[in-house]
Image: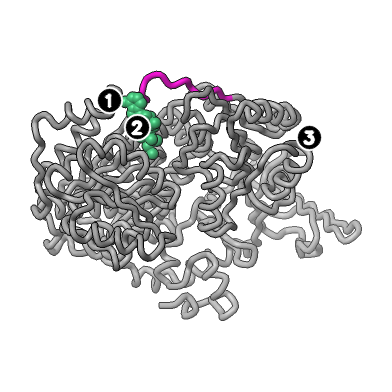
Amino acid sequence: MKVGELEGVGPKSVPLFRELGVETSHDLLDYLPFRYEDLRYPTPSNALGSSGGEENAVGTVSHVKERRVRGLEIVEVRLRDDAGEFTAKWIGRNRYVYGRFKEGMRLFVRGRVERTLAGAVINVTQYASLREGEAYHGEMVPVYRASKDLTTRKIASVVRKNLPRLLDEADDDPLPDDVRAKASYPALRDAYRAVHAPRTPEEAQQARERFIFTEFLVLAAGAQLRRAERERSHDASALTIPHDLLEQFAGSVGFPLTGAQRRAIGEIWEDMARDVPMNRLLQGDVGSGKTLVAAAAIVLAARNGMQSALMAPTEILASQHASKLAPLLLPFGITVEAVFGSQAAKARNAAEGRIASGEALLAVGTHALITGSVDFARLGLAIIDEQHRFGVEQRARLRAKGVAPHTLHMTATPIPRTLAQSVYADLDLSTIDELPPGRTPIETYAIRTSRLGRAYEFVEANVARGHQAYIVAPAIDEESELTSVIAEAERLKSDVFPERRIGLLHGRLSSREKDEVMGRFVRGEIDILLATTVVEVGVDVPNASVMVVLDALRYGLAQLHQLRGRVGRGAAKSFCLLVYPDDAGETERLGILTDSTDGFVIAEEDLRLRGAGEFAGTAQSGAADLWIADLVRDIDVYRVAKTEAQAIIAGDPTLRRPEHAALRAALERAPSTRALVLSS
Ligand code: ADP
Ligand code: MG
């Protein structure tokens, strides 16, 4: 049913509801209040003012004092209850209370309480008059997320008027009866009633938890189901691992592998030796040496006569991968074939020919890899770099180029372990938590904006020594000069670094223009690159040794860490300067960055400070799309739900039993983006 068909929703309200994401009666049912006002009990007048929040009182009017001052109504009503006297006060324009109250009336009032010498004074936010002899029956009033033109009151009234009809529209309960009984959660319709029209706060809370639990159950069951399906499919190639291959590989790279790299290679190879397709995420900080691990996987595939594909989000990243991989793979007779959108037709055709014949054992490219013209003879391994930058379908299309290829996802955005396991419930996780030895850590300083001039002198000094620098500004075309890359670029060119070659990179450039600017920076034709956060992911310019981030408090810690990772990739000592406003109060967050360069430590802190919904890694992964659950706040509920999901899928691996039909239906209804992001 469309909301327009509900009682109390006229044609004018329909678009207002739509703005809040509510189009159907079902959406409205799922539009849960985020808090309640407890109007159930009046406080006796002699106890008013102890809660600090809004309080309720009921009394009989003994005196009314009112005046108008330049359009302002000031109405003070003295009220009496069994415990004594108190005052209710209205001040404001258009409150329509002037002349409304008479001695002897009974009133309910609610508001924040001030204690004065003359007793308690309530600054009224809500009131109602009670008929003579009418007993006061207060309720729990739901508060909904509202908009300027659609108030919570209006939403509450529509919900209240239509509640029985709305409840009729509820789906079958996805929560199986036995699981529900075990947790003593209310039935679905009772739970909806209890969140929209609770009798007690406890009832509302319990219903809410039931929805959180169910949301997690559906999520976890979906991931389990896909894992079970994958485990049943024995259509991947089980690769043979020659006994001396690891030592051969390690011997050919020219430096010892770190322990974390060996472990990751071991985990990946073990997966690839099974006939069940691998689905593994390799996470590791920038510079932790993921490329090498990917190379080892490619070598194993090649030894078994299988081709590999590596897809990266931009041409620059893809070509950097190609040039880093080539020397690692050459000793194993593997040549790299590149497939880019900007490639000349002739070169592209030749590359595609070698991929189709099976001669090319590795194809590296962008989205161009998943176009129709690319065909693999025997694709055995699909590697997806910065996996969150690709859509579900794009990732699926790469896999579809082979028969159940093993899949390796890579990310440089470390996600805390607990969170990763729940977010990526269907992915196995390999973590590189150790940097190669001999790195000089990036020195990081937080500095006030008034010292920006000194920061730029420091940049100049480094550029004069032949290095390059990044300056990151938050946005384009903003009011504040400091935060506008375009304005800042002009200023830098004319006033600050007149001698230097300055490049400008921001999100309004086409991807071709971006690649062009980045290319010039990579080749050293630009000294200072002024950029928005589009520069964040993966680019490797070893000659860049300074990163300045303007207005650094705007960013999350994980994002700042990513930005910082653009420098410190060469032999020279590198620096990161985080610039914050002089009047900023809180700089604790920046302190975490100046103290640590460990991406996992920073990710944990970011998570702690911001919660899962805002956490960069999860926003990218789709976990932020959760309806009411929060993976950090509700992690305990999640654990129980995950265990229950495991038990359900273990006993009914395809969810064919009638008692699981509703759960299955809920899984099928779940937004595909969310479900699939979690699976792949
Ligand atoms: P990531 O892709 O994780 O950001 P890379 O694979 O690009 O990191 O590696 C970063 C740099 O570290 C490269 O120059 C690489 O040659 C070097 N490197 C990788 N592994 C090791 C190691 N075990 N010892 C020394 N240097 C290494
Ligand atoms: Mg890399």
Q: Which tag, 1 or 3, sits closer to the chain's start?
A: 3
Label 3, on which residue? 117
Residue at image point 47% right, 77% down: 6
Task: Answer whether labels 1 and 3 touch (C-beta < 8 Å).
Answer: no
Label 1, on which residue? 257
Q: Is residue 524 above or below residue 387?
A: above
Q: Is residue 403 above or below residue 161?
A: above
Q: Which mark is residue 216?
A: none
Q: Is residue 645 above or below residue 603?
A: below
Mark 2 Cβ inside 8 Å of ligand 1: yes
Q: Which mark is residue 289?
A: 2
Density class for disc 1 (Cα within 10 Å; few <14, some 14-19, many ≥20) is some
Q: Nearer the viewer, residue 348 or 80?
A: 348
Residue 416 seen by the camera: no
Magenta residue span: 434-444
Residue 539 seen by the camera: yes
Mark 1 Cβ inside 8 Å of ligand 1: yes
- In which quadrant of the rendered view does residue 29 lie? bottom left
